Each structure stands twice: as structure tokens, then as C-alpha cells.
Amino acid sequence: MLKRLFLKYRQLLLYTLFGGLTTVIDLAVYYILYNLFSIHYLVAQTISWIAAVLFAYVTNKRYVFVSRARGMTMLAELAKFISGRLFSFGVQTVCLAVLVELAHWNENVVRLPVLVIVTILNYVVSRVFVFEKKQDSTATTQEI
């Protein structure tokens, strides 16, 4: 029964797992840069975002959506992934700047709810726009 549930919700469960790990990477890099090295919070966010996106692409491609894209198709997939993440980065940056600068919320506290919203947005973009076709792990057609 557990195996059947896992198989039914595999993609969502793996996305949640790797999304959580991506968030941990994002938060850890941000925390270290902002709190230990006193780097401006928007610069720290940019660097932590880059680290998180690199991790997210690899794990989403390989484990969550099981993309078999290679060559030019993989480059197009990567470009769409980065475009989607740039969009969510913009959403994240605007939310963070508004909540910190205008609402005067704490820089560390505001990051978590904003990251939750961005994680949901990223799943939708990845599912619908980036990894469009349901990837079959037994697919025999691969682009080289």
C-alpha cells in the first residue's frame, strides 16, 4: 500500500524533498553571507539563489521529472528552467524588498514565507513549462 501511494505521488514527493533541500541550500548560503560576512541582503539573496538553482536543475532533471533530454534539447530545457527561475527570482526579490524596505519586516524572518510561495511557483512552472512531457523512465527515444 505504501509503495502504491509512493508511486502515485512520486513526482510530488520527490519535488517536495528536493525543493526542501533546495530551500535549505538557499537559506544556508544566504544566512552565511548575510549574517557572517555582512553582505547586503539582496546580494546574499542573489548568490544563494544561484547555488539553489544549480542544485534544483540537476535534481529536478534527474530525479523529479526524469528528463532524458540531451544535446540541444537539454540546452533548451535548461534555458526554460533558468527563465522560469529568473521569473520566480524577480517575484522573490520584489517581495523581499517590499517587505523589508517598506513594511520593515526582519530580513531573516521574511525569507521563509517568501521561499514557500516561490517553491510552489517553481513547481508549477517546471511541471507545465520546462519539463512539459511526462517523462517515462523506460523511454526508448532519447535525443543525443
Image: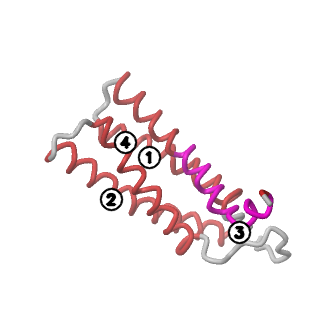
Determine whether the residue tagged by mark 3 lies in a helix, strand or loop: loop
Residue at figure coordinates x 55%, y 46% from the top left? 20
Residue that mark 1 sits on: 49
Residue that mark 4 sits on: 45
**Residue furthest to the top:** 36
Q: Are marks 1 and 4 in contact (CB under 8 Å)?
A: yes
The kind of residue tagged 3 is Ala
Residue at figure coordinates x 71%, y 69% from the top left? 69
Asked whether 60 falls inside the magenta stretch, the response is no
Q: Are marks 2 and 1 in contact (CB under 8 Å)?
A: no
The one nearer the camera, 4 or 137, is 4
Q: Earlier in the sequence, mark 3 or mark 1?
A: 1
Tell me if residue 107 can be seen: yes
Residue 69's disc is 3
Q: Quadrant of the C terminus?
A: bottom right
Residue at figure coordinates x 51%, y 43% from the top left? 51
Asked whether 9 falls inside the magenta stretch, the response is yes
The kind of residue tagged 1 is Trp
Residue that mark 2 sits on: 91
**Residue furthest to the front:** 1
Label 4 to label 2: alpha-carbon separation: 12 Å
The kind of residue tagged 4 is Gln
Instruction: Report whether 108 appears left or right of 74.
Output: left
Q: Earlier in the sequence, mark 2 or mark 1?
A: 1
Q: Give percent across and percent down for residue 104.
A: 16, 40
Q: Give percent across and percent down for residue 100.
A: 21, 43
Q: Quadrant of residue 13?
A: bottom right
Q: Quadrant of the N terminus?
A: bottom right
Q: Are marks 4 and 2 in contact (CB under 8 Å)?
A: no
Crowd rating for badge 3 (residues with CA inside 10 Å; few <14, some 14–19, many 20+): some
